[in-house]
Every structure is written in C-alpha cells, then in structure tokens.
Amino acid sequence: MHNHSAPSPSISALTHRATNNVTPADKQLARLILAASQRVPFYARHWRALSGRLASMQFPAQLGELPVVQKADLLAQPPEDLLDRSFREHRLSIEKTSGSSGQPMEMHKDAASVRRRSLRFLRALLSCGYRPGQRLLIISTRRTGGLMTYARWHYADLRDEELLQEYQKVRPEILYGPLTSLLQICEQARRTGTPLHRPTAVISTAEQLMPAQRELLQKAFDCGVGDFYGMTEIGLIAFRRPGANSYEMASNDLLLEFLPSDDDPYSERLIVTDVTGGAMPMIRYDTGDFVLRTAGPDKIIREFVGRRVDSIKLPSGMAISPYRFTMRLEALPQIRQYQVVQRKDMSLDVYFHSDERHTDTIREGISTALAELCGELPARIHFQKLALHKVAGKFRPVESELRASA
C-alpha cells in the first residue's frame, strides 16, 4: 500500500526558487487550502485530522502532510460535496472524464477556470509552432466553445472512420489529436496510397507516445511531433515541443509533486495541485500516472511512462509498472510495435509486429523478458501488425483488465 500522507520527497513549486522565502504563490496556496477546508465538504472531512493545524502550517513545505486525493475518493462522494459552496449559485459547465480507470467522473467548471485552461492550451500551442490565423485541426470527441470559435480552427470527430478524408480536406498547418487517431490517418494514407498533406507540426495527446510511434508520425507527416499531457480533472499539465527531449510545465498555477513508486524504483507517481482553485478544487490529486525524470538538480520530466492501474499484478500481490515492460521490450532490435495485456485470469497476451525475418528473434527476446519480469504468469505471444485492444478508446502499450480492482 502507498503511504499517501508521507511528506513529498520532491515538489516542483510554482517557480524555481528557494523554499525558505514566502512568496505570493505560497500565500495563494495557503489561502486555497484554508478556503477548501471551510467551503468544500469533502476536504473538510479528508483533512479532519489536521483541521486544528491547517491555519499554522507552512505551504508548500508542509503540503506533503495533507493526504493525497485519489479518484476513488472523489467518486465515493455526493457530487455537491466536491463543490466550493461559494460557487453554488454560479452557472457551471460539466465535463466527464474518460473513464479509463474504470468509472467516469463529472467535473464541474466555473467560467474563469475554463478560460484559464483554454489560455494554457493556447500558450502551449504557440510554444509548439502554432501562429494565430493558421489552420488548426483538432481531433476530439466534443466540440468545445471559447477558442474553438476562432477562425480557421477546425474539428473532426475521432470516432469518424474517414479521418484521412477530413485531414486532406482541411490541410491544416497544425494537427492535434489522440495518438490512435493520428496513427489511423497514417494507416489510411498508406493503405490507399494517398500522399499526406505536410503540416508545420503534429501534436499527439491522450495516450503514451512511444519513440517508435513518434518516429512513424515524423516520417509520415514529414514534420516535428509534439506531445501534450493533461487530464479532464486538471486540464493541460505539461507539453513537449517538437524535437525536444523533455516536457515543460504548462502553467505556473500548477504545483507538481513526485512520490516514490512501490511498483518501480525507476519512475515516480505524479501528484498535481491547481493553485487557482475554482468551483471544484483539485488539491494533491493523484493523476495515477508514472513519470520518469532527468538526472541533475532540475529533474525535468522526460517521459510519462504508464498508469498505475495498468501495472501488471502477480499472484504474490506484487505489481510491476508499465515502464519496466516498455524499457525491456523497446530494447529489442527490429520491434516496431508491441502491447502487453493482462487478462482477468492474470495471464498475459503479448502482441508484437516486426519484419517477418526477425519474428523468431523477437519472440525469443519477449519470452526472456517475461520470464525475468513475471515468470510465474502464463503468457501467450502473438505476431500481429496492430494491437487494437483499448480502454475508453485509448491505446495503451501495457494494459491490465484487472484495473477495476487496482
């Protein structure tokens, strides 16, 4: 079990600074926590053990003493108990999470929070090469207001079977969408022999972008490929510019913490606080994602390496993080694509694709990796061009059907 109330070993604060100086950002965080303890019933209960100390605690230095908030904690509450009472009379927009952890959740957003998230998204687009007036094609499940109403922003439904046709029609300078949809356009172009329009940049989102997939997109679209990491609960959190090897924070309003992972000594759990608060404050929210950071004093995020609910479970009760599988399988020469799926009976199905000349070598390499990582689990290895096993429409290179019990 994770010790959710243990102090954080690392906090990426609102700015890179010494923590012994009280800044306006620190005061804003302290105000947010005190307001949430008084006006949000969930936090009043969640922090009950600390209620007598909150006013005298120093933030962010003592932020780690507040218990982490899990998605399951929020799902267990009556919806009204998650809202700041001062927003009860406001008109709020509602957006559902994807449900990739097993159950979707409704997020209530006030107008100011929606504007801040939209501007955060726009600033990241500008950092990745977008310029006002350029054609932008967004592949999504919903049409959004605000910035989407500006001229030359186009929308395509990711459920559309003919995304290639819409892409070629719009001919965008910037293409933005879930990784699976971007790969779908590439596959349709390859299958039909259609020369792809060349954009200025392609930006992948919603799914883990593996090096081999980034290379495929770069070759197919003949341009740089960026990556946006975010979630419905928080909005955009971090982004990687085309050609960059690490991620940048999307906003100074977000405070990131990195906690040790029980499943993997190499990666860390990502915890996020949105210091601006809003109608439904998210304070020390466990994203459920593992991250890998660079060495050195800055320790910048290098990769997002899978979700905790997709850790592979062993009969002993131990769990193996997705990153340990990706680290081993990506090291196999000539492997083009792979996916590891843990079934409900705990057995594994491993799908891979490569040049047929190398299938025996790769199959042997996969068998060796599985024996070392989880030798007690039965496993089946399949040579298959594209693994289409998805949770909530998202492709995951390591995926567990036991996620509901995670």
Image (tube, rainbow, N blue to C red):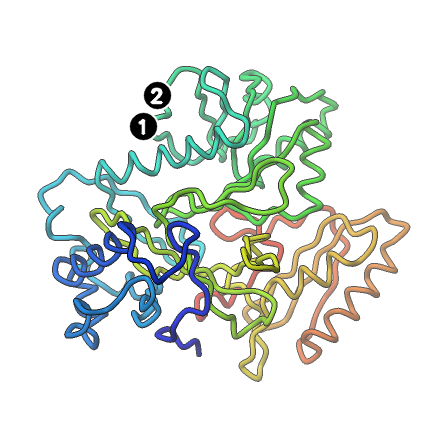
Q: Residue 336, position in %: x, y? A: 76, 48
At x 17%, y 63%, the residue is: 37
Crowd tier of the residue under label 2, counting other residues whose Cα lies within 10 Å: few below 14, some 14–19, many 20 or above: few
Residue 377 is marked as: none
Q: Position of residue 223 (x, y in %)?
A: 67, 28
Foreground residue, 270 or 157?
270
In the image, 393: left or right of 76? right
Is 108 above or below relative to 328? above
- Foreground residue among 73 and 189: 73
What residue sits 74% from the left and 63% below the top? 381
Residue found farthest to the front: 21
Quarter of the image where the C terminus is located: bottom left
Judging depth in this view, the residue of 337 and 134 nearest the camera is: 134
Q: Circle 1 sits on which residue?
A: 145
Q: What amino acid does circle 1 point to?
A: Gly
Q: Which residue is mark 2?
A: 149
Q: Quadrant of residue 20?
A: bottom left
Q: Are there few (<14), some (14-19), or many (20+) residues within 10 Å of tag 1?
A: few
Q: Is residue 406 visible?
A: yes
Q: Position of residue 132 (x, y in %)?
A: 45, 18
Q: Helix or strand or loop: what does disc 1 sit on?
A: loop
Whether residue 102 is visible, yes or no, is: no
Q: What is the secondary structure assignment of the residue under circle 2? A: helix
Q: Amino acid at mark 2?
A: Thr
